[in-house]
Image: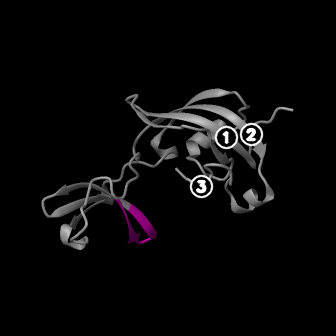
Amino acid sequence: MSMNVAKGKVVGFAYHLQNSEGETLDESKDPMEYLHGFQNIIPGLEKEMEGLKIGDKKTVTVLPADAYGEYNEELVYKIPRTNFPADEEIQPGMQFRADGEEGPISLFVQEVVGDDVIMNGNHPLAGETLKFDVEIHTIREASAEEMEHGHSHGPGGHHHH
């Protein structure tokens, strides 16, 4: 009996992610499992995986709106270096959590300029058109517990991209 990717199925897939310039951004070493239909992966990719079968390969292009959002200039903040612990070395790419108006937001350090730290609340891939090459390895029914929690508990089921 062949299964298709559908809501409530746990799907194991391998992927190769490139940006619009064709640079590799991420690549799965082992297939990654996710519970389909619960927005555990970016919406544009999830939509394109619907209906695929084991062994299917597909190239999916996802626009920013269906991936990590458009780039928002207003999410770039200049914060005095003195706001950070003096004994901590601030490096580009470091991530901090801050309290935004709508709950906690993640900011990452874009650069350190003199006495200022430029913090960016955009996802590093915001504004990027992403190209995924995916291959479906496994499809199984989710367990009752997985359905209840809204994500898979298999190997690698806990890192959310």
Q: Is residue 102 magenta?
A: yes
- In percent of the image, x 39 and y 44: which residue is there? 127
Secondary element under disc 1, as helix, strand or loop, is: strand
Circle nearer the N terminus (2, 3): 2
Q: Residues within 10 Å of mark 1 (few under 14, many from 20)?
A: many
Q: Is residue 53 magenta?
A: no
Circle nearer the N terminus (1, 2): 1
Percent x, y of residue 15 = 56, 35
Identity, as a three-letter code, of the amino acid under mark 3: His
**Residue, disc 3:** 158
Mark 1 vs 2: CB contact within 8 A: yes
Distance, label 1 to label 2, CA atoms, is: 6 Å
* Magenta region: 95-106
Distance, label 2 to label 3, CA atoms, is: 18 Å
Where 100 sits versus 12, above or below?
Answer: below
Disc number placed over residue 139 in the picture, else none: 2
